[in-house]
Image: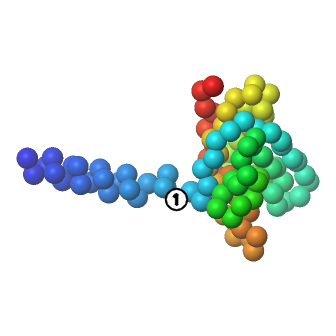
Amino acid sequence: MKWISTFIFSLVVVLLSSPVFSWDGVVEGKISRLDVSNGDVAGYRVMLKNVSSMCTRGWDWAYLNHNDTNYNAFISTLLAAKVSGTTVKIHSNHDASSQQYCHIGYIMLMEN
C-alpha cells in the first residue's frame, strides 16, 4: 500500500513541475496575419483573430526567429493552419529583450 502512496506523490510532483505550467502566454484562435522580415529579431510574427494579448506583456503578436530549434516545422505548421483555417494554440514566453516580446515555444493544431 505504501508504494501506491509513493507513486501518487511522485506523479503529482512530476505533473506540477512540468514545463507546461511555465508559459507566459497560452492562446488559441485562427491566424489573422503572418508577418515576415529579414531581421534576426522577431523575423516571423503571428497574430490571431480576436486575441489582443499573446502573453502577459500585452503584445498582440508572437514570433519565431530563423535560428530557433525546429523553425521549419513551426513555419510549415503555421502556414498550413493559415491556409486551412485551422485553429492553433500558441504557447509563448517573454524573450530577454527590454520589451519582453512573446517568443513562440510550442504550437498545437486544434480540431475545428
Q: Residue at x 91, y 53 (%)?
A: 38
State the image coordinates of residue 80 (x, y, percent, origin top left): 75, 30
Q: How many marks?
A: 1
The colour scheme of the drawn protein is rainbow
Quick check: can you spot residue 33? yes
Q: Residue at x 61, y 38 (%)?
A: 108
Q: Amino acid at mark 1?
A: Ser
Which of 59 and 44 lies nearest the eye of the viewer?
59
Which of 99 and 67 lies nearest the eye of the viewer?
99
Mark 1 crowdedness (10 Å alpha carbons): few <14, some 14-19, many ≥20: few
Which of 8 and 71 lies nearest the eye of the viewer?
8
Residue sitting at the far left: 1
User: Which residue carries the number 1 mark?
Assistant: 22
State the image coordinates of residue 62 (x, y, percent, origin top left): 74, 53
State the image coordinates of residue 102 (x, y, percent, origin top left): 70, 58
State the image coordinates of residue 19 (x, y, percent, origin top left): 49, 55
Image side of residue 81 versus residue 27, left or right: right
Q: Residue at x 73, y 52 (%)?
A: 52
Quadrant in which the C terminus appears: top right
